[in-house]
Amino acid sequence: MEKFIVAGEVQLTGHIKVNGAKNATLPLMAATLLSTGVSVLHNIPQLRDITMMQDILTLLGAKIHRENGTLIIDTTGVSKEEIPEHLMREMRASVFLMGPLLGRFRRVRLSYPGGCAIGPRPINLHIKALEKIGAVVNDRCGFIDAEAVHLTGGEIHFDFPSVGATENAMMAAAVASGTTIIRNAAREPEVADLETLLNKMGARISGAGTDTIRIQGVERLAPAEHTVIPDRIEAGTFLIAGALTRGDIVVDNIIPEHLFAVIDKLQEIGARIDPDGNSVRIRGGEMRGVDIKTLPYPGFPTDLQAPLLALLTIAKGTSIITETIFENRFKHVDELGRMGAKIKVEGRTAVIRGVPRLSGTVVAAHDLRAGAALVLAALAAEGVSEIEQVYHIDRGYEAFEKKLQQVGAKIVRRSP
């Protein structure tokens, strides 16, 4: 397996550009199945998860062509409603296909999805939402069969504002008869981006980005062209890297309002941040500990908990992080401990006592965001670090090491 070799104690300086959002792209790709014809998506990152979604859509009958950062998706030949089990097990985001396949064919069959092992992520909310608008769902022997002779509008209330369940319900309800109202909906920017594409396709949806979404079903949707929003998690990762290395970097192609919770915490830690249109400049300084609780948007994102924890390992004083979204999202703690960090985990809470510096060593990335956190820690550590299992990082960051090299990081990818 490939690994990163990182020489630490380098201050990052310069400009770094953010790609389109992975977490927006995957449901947008799924949404193209709701129409027959050619849809065009721009600002698409080159990521392992995107490639796997392309493979799934191709097996279903779509023809996909990529030109640089643009995906051209022809869904004319899509005729299958069953998703191959081996691909479902590889990627959690394959669950996004439930809603559009049910909407187009009125039936879908899939196995339980896989993905990063960061804790249970049941899809019961997806199933209950689809049942509310007319689907009959059978769950047996590890497979889910859903069928709907008629999709009808309905009232959906989520116990928890699940992003995936909200998006699946939006896609299916877009072609249901009648009006669907989703309450306690996820408010993430990626949900609003999906609304934008669906409305371009002819859907009648309003309220995405708030906790109540109203969908007036239409008979059919048409192909559309759309540019994906910037990746706020990638942007946040690079902002944290600037603060952690006490550097001076500008993160370009960013929507600052998508990162208010992150920017607020970085300022509280001691970083100086200056938004300027679609860019944000961050200058690191003396860092102090803070308390953080991960929450659904607009709260602090769980996907940036690990990178920020890496920063707090060398901040003065004591910090407390409470993880409320995923229960197994502290797998990076043991690896950071190998680098000299002082962290104690009790249940969903981590107590971090800042140390003057970390030391380079050999560590392993156990999931996507944990891997990014270890790279960031290595950038500030004394000596050389080796980060193994970097294929996890490739799932969510395009050319991660090359972008960091552009701002002065001493990092290389090495094959066995």
Image (cartoon, rainbow, N blue to C red):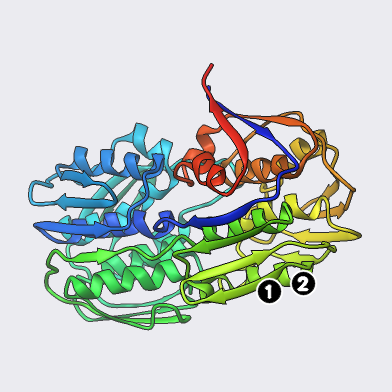
x 51%, y 52%: residue: 122
Instruction: Examine the rendering and report whether any part of residue 102 can be seen.
Output: no
Q: Secondary structure at mark 1?
A: helix
Q: Specify whether 390 is left or right of 323.
A: left
x 60%, y 67%: residue: 281
x 42%, y 66%: residue: 190
Q: Nearer the viewer, residue 350 or 396?
A: 396
Label 1 is placed on what type of residue?
Asp
Q: Secondary structure at mark 2?
A: helix
**Quadrant of the rendered image containing residue 260:** bottom right
Q: Mark 2 sits on what residue?
A: 268
| Tag 1 and tag 2, C-beta contact below 8 Å | yes
Q: Nearer the viewer, residue 296 or 9?
A: 9
Residue 259 place in picture, x, y as percent:
57, 70
x 32%, y 78%: residue: 154
Q: Which label is found at residue 388?
A: none
Q: CA distance from mark 1 to mark 2?
A: 6 Å
Local packing at callout 1 (Cα closer than 10 Å; few below 14, some 14-19, many 20+) is few
Task: Count all numbered tags in the image, as a single digit.
Answer: 2
Q: Mark 1 sits on what residue?
A: 264
Instruction: Examine the rendering and report whether any part of residue 190 can be seen.
Output: yes
Local packing at callout 2 (Cα closer than 10 Å; few below 14, some 14-19, many 20+) is some
Relative to 289, say whether 332 is above or below: above
Residue 335 place in picture, x, y as percent:
75, 36
Residue 322 place in picture, x, y as percent:
75, 61
Relative to 392, say whether 42 is above or below: below
Label 2 is placed on what type of residue?
Glu
